[in-house]
Image (cartoon, grey):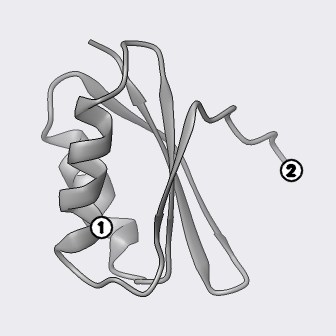
Amino acid sequence: MSSKPTATETLDVKGQSCPMPIVKTKQAIDDLEAGDVLEVVATDSGSMSDIRGWADGTDGVELLEQVEEDELYIHYVEKTA
């Protein structure tokens, strides 16, 4: 099993459904510096595709990893610019 990226900040969006995980992820990323990694912890299974799609379509962010464990969906997003 690969080691998880080291998060600079953690965003808890458990219990929230689309579009709130994306809205809050974008707000949190805007507050970070380039090179920082945001760990997003969600309970919405749709966040797996939503966050991937958002990261793929957004300049200055990169989705590093997504992990599903114990009904949690954990996303690691790096601010690259």
The part of the image, by quadrant, that contains residue 9 is top right
**Which one is in front, 13 or 68?**
13
N-term-proximal mark, 2 vs 1: 2
Q: State the image coordinates of residue 6 (x, y, percent, origin top left).
A: 69, 32
SS at circle 2: loop
**Which one is in front, 7 or 65?**
7
71 to the left or right of 36: right
Residue wearing tag 2: 1
Q: State the image coordinates of residue 36 (x, y, percent, origin top left).
A: 48, 22
User: What is the three-letter code of the residue carrying label 1?
Assistant: Pro
Mark 2 is surrounded, within 10 Å at the Cα level, by few (under 14), some (14 to 19) or many (20 or more) other residues, namely few
Q: Which mark is residue 58?
A: none
Foreground label between 2 and 1: 1
Q: Which mark is residue 21?
A: 1
The part of the image, by quadrant, that contains residue 73 is bottom right
Split into 4 quadrants, where in the image is the C terminus?
top left
SS at circle 1: helix
The part of the image, by quadrant, that contains residue 62 is top left
